[in-house]
Amino acid sequence: MTGPQAWAPERWAVRPTTLVRADGLGARLGCDLTLAVECFQPTGSFKYRAALNVARTVPQERIIAASSGNFGQALALACRVTGKRCTVVMPSTSARVKVDRVLSFGGEVDMVDVAATSRSDRVAQLAADDPSAYLASAYDDDLVIQGNASLGRELADCGPAFDCVVAPVGGGGLTAGLVLGLRERGAHSAVWGAEPALGNDAARSLRSGKIERNAAEPTTLADGARTLSLGERNWAILQHGLAGIVEVPEELIRAALISLMEEANVKCEPTGALALGAVLAEPARFANKRICCVVSGGSVDRAVLVAILSEGRAG
């Protein structure tokens, strides 16, 4: 279908998460494992929940945001179906597939070399040029957190309570939303964060009791977690709402991605594999429990995926 009907809002609603029982993988890891796969959202990740909530709620006609890709493409589509426009500041290292999808949904991409100018500085420059625009954070925004809370509510309503829900941590928008959504339903599932060991600012923050920052964007394979720090709004929820954070080494991010493909038939991006990577990193912590791992997104460059799979076979 082409033309205006192709972008009718009812065609682009948030989809219920896809729950996959991973019995074989769970048996190997010693737990009862369910995957909450967000790869089938309209833009391929959980970020669409947040972006659509932002675009529907704010009165501004233009939205400016920084994103490594998933929030950017989600915001571009959300703006298209709500009749708004957006500019997405993206690092020059962003996955090409994510840049192309922002453009395909009608978003404007502003590429930045983060070694010379931070994403936040570039967003500030654009905002100064257009004070009427709404500045949306991909994670440190109440509307973003509220949008992500819908996933927590779904997981609370899906059946017997999970002992633990494990999800990736970058800026903290997903885990903060999960905490709020589960609380809204009165669920007592422990929420665990999964963070790249190369960018462990959130784990350090929990240990110190205050927000810690990375000196530069982490070079982790999990590009969706290349944030400098947690957001202030997220920290207010996570410092008391998280059960803890598991720091996942790069080799286990790769191993988790391969396991998801080969043992659960789920294709995802490296950031989406972080939650399973946490279980691989600390299996004793999750042993004999009913676990839900959130597979947060599936947008991965073909070359990156081929390299990971080839390295896994070589190993």
Image: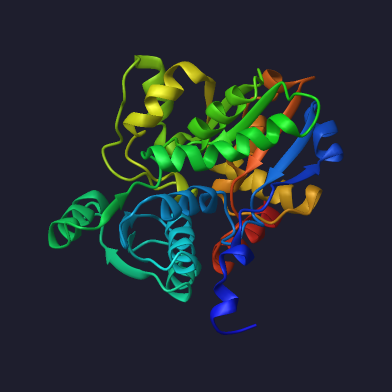
Looking at the image, residue 208 lies above or below residue 164: above
Looking at the image, residue 109 lies above or below residue 193: below
Between residue 115 and residue 191, name the one nearer to us: 191
Q: Is residue 54 visible?
A: yes
Farthest-out residue, left = 128
Task: Indicate the position of residue 185 as horizontal and vertical percent values.
Answer: 64, 25
Horizontally, residue 115 falls left or right of residue 1, namely left
Horizontally, residue 129 falls left or right of residue 48, namely left
Farthest-out residue, bottom = 2
Q: Quadrant of residue 305?
A: bottom right
Farthest-out residue, front = 59
Between residue 124 and residue 119, name the one nearer to us: 124
Residue at the image position 13 percent from the left and 62 percent from the top = 129
Q: Quadrant of residue 252?
A: top right
Task: Indicate the position of residue 286 as horizontal and vertical percent values.
Answer: 70, 22
- The color scheme shown is rainbow
Between residue 223 and residue 132, name the one nearer to us: 132
Task: Indicate the position of residue 232 as horizontal and vertical percent values.
Answer: 32, 30
Task: Indicate the position of residue 192 as horizontal and vertical percent values.
Answer: 58, 26
Please give the count of numbered marks on the rendered protein: 0
Residue at the image position 56 percent from the left and 32 percent from the top = 178
Looking at the image, residue 196 lies above or below residue 306: above
Looking at the image, residue 90 lies above or below residue 274: below
Residue at the image position 67 percent from the left and 57 percent from the top = 40
Residue at the image position 67 percent from the left and 24 percent from the top = 164
Q: Quadrant of residue 156?
A: top right
On-image quarter of the N terminus: bottom right
Q: Is residue 116 visible?
A: no
